[in-house]
Image (tube, rainbow, N blue to C red):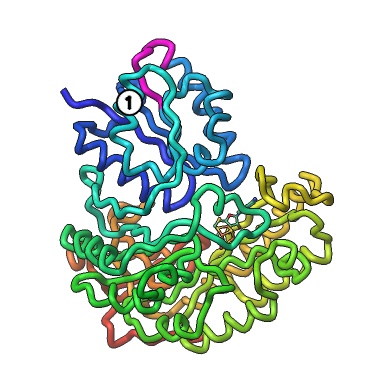
Amino acid sequence: MANKLHLITYGCQMNEYDSERVAGLLRERDYELTTDEREADVILLNTCAIREKAEDKVFSKLGELKRLKAARPDLVIGVMGCMAQLQQENVLRRAPSVDLVFGSPAIARVGELVERARRERRPVLDTAEAPLVKITAKAAGAERLKAFVTVMEGCEKHCTFCVVPRTRGRERSHTPEAIVAEIEGLVAEGCREVTLLGQTVNAYGRDLTPPTDLAELFHRVNDVEGLARIRFTTSNPYNLTPTLIRAMREVPKVCEWFHLPLQSGSDRILERMNRGYTRARYLELVEALREAEPAMAFSTDIIVGFPGETDEDFEATVEMIERVGYDNVFVFRYSRRPGTPAAAMPDQIPDAVKAARNGRLLEVVQRVTAARGGLLAGRTMEVLVDGTSRKSPGELAGRTRCNRVVNFDGQGQVAVGDVIHVLVTDVLPHSLRGALATPEEAVCWSR
Ligand code: SAH
Ligand code: F3S
């Protein structure tokens, strides 16, 4: 009988991608996935360390699993990913029921590591650096319409608040050949949209010989027949080049959606964060991108309550959100991460102030994103059909190139995976409603 693996994934899209590789590698060793932790022989938690809360969640889950382990001592519990890399032995100290701790560089060896943990009956720890390998193994039934593809690992930016350079190591890019081959394989199984992943994806390729860049990669991925759309995340404004901006316009499959983390709208705070740009520079980039592609939608990440953030700094952030006019904003309360320079800064902000700023910002974000959504009413937009509507199963659902959800009545006329056109009839807070339209009715919309 096959062994059973239960896999719990926390955190970002890169972790989701890694989890699929792990499931695939263990499948080759006769492990099949189960959604029921009680019947698992091995439970792996793929963890995130970006904020303290993410780690708390994992420790509380490990606390729960302790009981399962007490009842079934042969159960193997493993902690992998960023928190494993950051905390290492601390995980074992705080959660003695854990048998295995390994960071992302060790993923390629997961099969051996799990076997060792099962055999040796004492904790196994592997958080060493290792060369980058492209793992092509996939979980059973992983064929799908949209897929993530990691194109680079690591980050060397050293923003003062961030643990990623410690958890994910140096910047290392996969070769364009390996990436294109992976995407061709996905498309052969029905994939129509890929999201190219990297912590600073727009720094892609500069470590390769010969060096290359994301713009060049766009062109190569664009040539994959059968693929409809290319997305990418996450970009750092510091590395945004005119070449990439041009490619956003020139490469047809690249969608008009740009995730460009701002973090703060105050120059003083940006400097303390070591972000490498000013608000004026950021606005210039937004302007250049909208000039290249008027339909460009922007999303961003904001941290509230960074050490030393005054009311005035915070107001500068509010003002930037209004000025840029984002389609989506992710707001985070600053979290002190071990070993980062900002954690040692003296003027930490009280939780109550962070909470108040967080609340205020969410109100602003709701207003700004709703206004952006309002601009879409009456427009005909390209939609990739990806399933049925969550609320009314009689309807189909899809996403626009600018990443908004659209529900429409198209049963019997179009199928999942089709790229079609929809006339937007209603703009709701979290989705659009529309009716099937012909491409001739489509007009590119501008600000
Ligand atoms: N590479 C990306 C960031 C990846 S981390 C970039 O260049 O911006 C994802 C988001 O988590 C960040 O954009 C930031 O907003 C948030 N984040 C990172 N560290 C944080 C911390 N210590 N506290 C709160 N939020 C944090
Ligand atoms: Fe983190 Fe800054 Fe890199 S936010 S991932 S150190 S670009």
| Image: 397 above or below 71 | below
- Whether residue 72 is in magenta: the answer is yes
Q: Is residue 74 visible?
A: yes
| Image: 304 above or below 287 | above
- Magenta highlight range: 69-77
Work out whether residue 360 or residue 277 is closer to the camera in this orientation and state it.
277
- Residue under numbered circle 1: 116
Residue plotted at (34% across, 82% down): 251
Q: Amino acid at mark 1?
A: Arg
Provide residue 286's location: percent of width, then percent of height: 57, 80
Q: Is mark 1 within 8 Å of ligand 2?
A: no
Numbered-mark total: 1
Residue plotted at (55% across, 86% down): 288
Q: Quadrant of residue 59?
A: top right
Q: Quadrant of residue 32?
A: top left
Provide residue 330's location: percent of width, then percent of height: 58, 58
In this image, 147 relative to 68: left or right? Answer: left
Point out the residue furthest to the top here: 71
Ligand 1 picture quarter? bottom right
User: Label 1's element?
Assistant: helix
- Whether residue 207 is in magenta: the answer is no
| Image: 98 above or below 274 | above
Residue plotted at (29% across, 32% down): 112
Provide residue 444's location: percent of width, then percent of height: 40, 86
In this image, 204 relative to 228: left or right? Answer: right
Work out whether residue 250 or residue 362 is closer to the camera in this orientation and state it.
250
Residue plotted at (19% across, 68% down): 413
Provide residue 321's location: percent of width, then percent of height: 66, 70
Work out whether residue 316 or residue 170 is closer to the camera in this orientation and state it.
170
Work out whether residue 126 or residue 309 is closer to the camera in this orientation and state it.
126
